[in-house]
Image: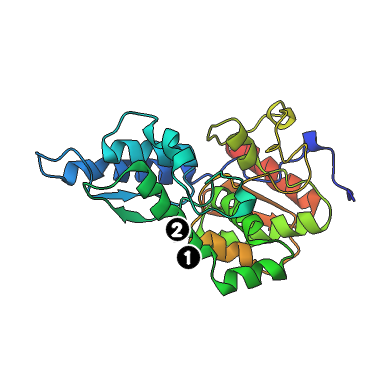
Amino acid sequence: MQTKTPRRGTIRLTRRGRIALIATGAAAVAAAVAVPLLLPDDDTRAETLTIPEGWRSGQVYEAVDKALDVPAGTTKKALPKADLKLPKDAGGNPEGYLFPATYPLSSQSTPASVLSYMVNTAGKKFGVGQVAAGADRNAVNVYQSVTIASMIEAEAGSKEEMGKVARVIYNRLDQGMPLQMDSTINYALNRSTLATSERDTKINSPYNTYARMGLPPTPIGNPGEEAMRAATNPTPGDWLYFVTVKPGDTRFTSSFEEHQKNVGEFNKAK
């Protein structure tokens, strides 16, 4: 099924990580940290908890621990008894279904109840008819659509780019090409970086979309509505490659030769 794709060592499909990730992540962390500062002096627990788009489950667990003022690791340990209403395909892993939003907290809130609130919200957002219909049009199921949306969230530098990134993913799947997404390698290595080395692309992981065909086994973060909308309604186009040469200048193309030129400009601009 492999088409005429140059050897993996010579190609970078993605932008080597999301250029906007550092800025948006920093802003999101600042917002999350700022929440307790708004509380009365005699209250050690947050009144709300904000989960930004694209956060991984580990980041969510840490934020819940802090917001509820419980020992680190408490939320993650609560998972087995939380009875989360996840789709069967998730296999009990809530990654992708900890829906990004601002959640109210009370003195009765527990790690399990907060996680359930997030998963139930995702079920309402992702379980609507148009999501299922969009998944059918793209020959995937809803869980796979969430997985694709999580990659879109990690790769796209803006909402305007999301539909094009989605189209690149579907075009590559349709043509039997490896996705070669740096974001999935970052997930496997539990990091966020703007550069992926050739050594990184050879790691033994089901999330290594350079070495393995198809989608990663689970979502790689928790996507928001815009990313999910792009995953179910990708922008029409024949693109197979994209690279962000500099912030605000992401170039999509179906030509490997043109992509090489764009990557060359990216390397010069680093």
> Image quadrant of residue 201?
top right
Crowd tier of the residue under label 2, counting other residues whose Cα lies within 10 Å: few below 14, some 14–19, many 20 or above: some
> Image quadrant of residue 165?
bottom right
Label 1 vs label 2: CA separation?
6 Å
Residue nearest the viewer, comparing 116 with 194 = 116
Mark 1 touches mark 2? (CB < 8 Å): yes
> What is the x, y in percent for residue 69?
26, 35
Amino acid bearing label 2: Asn
Residue nearest the viewer, comparing 252 with 185 = 185
> What is the x, y in percent for residue 137?
71, 71
What element does badge 2 sit on? Answer: helix
Q: Mark 1 points at which residue?
A: 124
- Establish if 257 lies above or below 204: below
Image-based side of 213 in relation to 114, left or right: right
Query: In the rendered image, is residue 250 in sight?
Result: no
> What is the x, y in percent for residue 94?
52, 46
Q: Which residue is drawn at 73% across and 28% down?
A: 204
Q: Name the residue under label 2.
A: 120
Image-based side of 120 in relation to 142, left or right: left
Residue nearest the viewer, comparing 191 with 253 = 191
Residue nearest the viewer, comparing 55 with 127 = 127
